[in-house]
Amino acid sequence: MGNDEREVRLKKIEEIRKIGVFPYKDRFERNRTLLEAGGLAVGTENVRIAGRVMTIRKFGKLIFATLKDNTGKLQIALQAQEIEAGLFSFFKKYIDIGDFVGAAGSIFKTKLGEVTLDVGRFELLSKALRPLPEKWHGLQERELLYRRRYLDLCMNEGTLEKFEKRTRIIRAMRDYLDRHGFIEVETPVLQTKPSGAIATPFTTHHNALDLDLYLRIAPETYLKRCIAGGLDRVYEFARCFRNEGIDPSHLQDFTLLEWYAAFWNYSDNMKFTKELIADVVSAVNGKTEVTFGEKKIDFGGEWETWSVRDLLLRDAGIDIFQVEGGDERGLRKALDERGIEIEDSDKMGFGPLVDALYKKVSRPNLDGPVFLIHHPIGLSPLSRKNDEDARVTDRFQVVVNGWEIVNAYSELVDPVDQRERFETQAELRRRGDAEAMPVDEDFLEAMEYGMPPISGLGLGVDRFVALLLNEENLRDVILFPLMRPL
RNA sequence: GGGCCGCUAGCUCAGUAGGUAGAGCAACGCCCUUUUAAGGCGUGGGUCGAAGGUUCGAUUCCUUCGCGGCUCACCA
């Protein structure tokens, strides 16, 4: 008979229309959410609720069903003798799991004590064509969770709460910044020069202007222009795009929160960052400690601070500023002597080699939160040189669980120095490094008009959220991760 | 991109030392006024991810491909 559920339901819709009922209503007047209705006293009348039918249990002249809305679930009961004529058999014949219905009636308690709506009238609000996933296990397959997130959200306990929590985290960050005199701005996603980070951009084309454009890899240079214009404290939740590999801790599009404050240096920003994070964590979690897998990570109290140099001295036994010749050749020799292998190390300059070494020997072991400061200058084309030691920049990162959550520095505002750094990058780019930055004349010009001292920061929102949600894969904190089409 | 693993009914999963497949839920029919994983009786539903190969015979073995996950490398 019914060999295809979809066909069966399409036929039901036809029949429903034939008897003069429209299967897709435009509205329903509720006076209670399901959560509210579940808290009402027995005997309360004129309760009007709506929701999705999740389960149905039929007995000849009695039907129980469970409705669900975004506040919770409520059982409804239809009794053949008490409900309006015709409605009982309509429900029995035409209502399926997955349909949306509105119902009106009074509250009673079943023999087993469950608060239930005794339905006097109901309306089909929207008919579903496909069956919902199985009621005990919900949807399990990872691929289906991502491709059909709506089913994950409505079937799997905790998914909805997870995404609501993501929103609360972001709101808590926004609140904190607003309370501290920052204003939120929006800067271009389509840019003519990819800038503000070292990464491979996506390219696209504007037809009307016949112009090749890049999707931004960071909002940085535009936010600094804002500061140049006198917006002393700005931030943006910036969706950024990087045309690189996808893995559990990297997405091709991700949300980067950046903020910039005039007259701050990186040290002011470290203090502010630590306070913001501790505040957000306790606002959302009720305490500063987060459980991540087996680890307990506490964002309260003091955070350890390591310079890149000291950290590598500890973890690799190499003083990066005492290697022979003070350049990449000397560093490579030191690595060889200690048997530390780094792929393609012969193609790297000093800065990238230091970075590769750090990622190999140190970062995976940093559960954090840890401040990592004073990165070598070649790694940070937009950050300010340290006044005491020109080999390093006034930069810091926050590392948690081996993930770089935050990257920040005292911004470079010296246009002459900036031009030199751009030219170094441009040279790398000419030699085929797709990640190196091109010279950004427009940004340089803005800098030449004058910028105050600035400290700016980027925070990986998806990673931060993942930490607070105890999820290891960033795709699990994104509603609709990119999937290859089938 | 490399390595490993997975893909069987709408969903969750069994299974076949190679003889063209099963269960539960969902669906369809019947019985049933207190269930909440309702129950009972009955029925239908699958190109076993795709294509080639080996074989008398492939869902099972081999190869290639697709989609996904984990992992290594690279990037936040």
Image: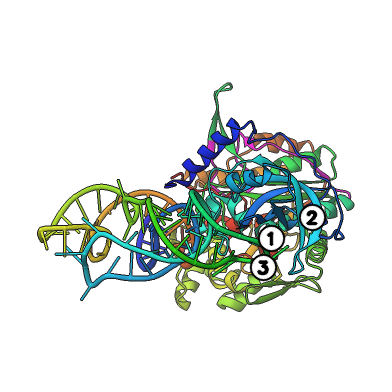
- Is A206 or A166 nearer to us in this picture? A166
Q: Distance between the residues labelled 1 and 3?
A: 9 Å
Q: Position of residue A57 (x, y in %)?
A: 62, 58
Q: Residue tagged by mark 2?
A: A173
| Residue for point 53% across, 64% down | A356
* Disc 3 chain ID: A
A336 relative to A210 in the view: left or right? left
N-terminal label among 1 and 3: 3
Residue A302 part of the magenta-drawn span: no
Residue denoted by label 1: A464
Who's the residue at 64% across and 30% down the image? A20
Labelled pair 1, 2 in contact (Cβ < 8 Å): no
Q: Mark 3 points at which residue?
A: A400
Q: Given the image, on which type of amino acid does mark 3 rest? A: Val
Confirm whether residue A80 shows in the render. yes
Work out how far the residue at label 2 is from the one at label 3, CA to CA, in angstroms.
Answer: 18 Å
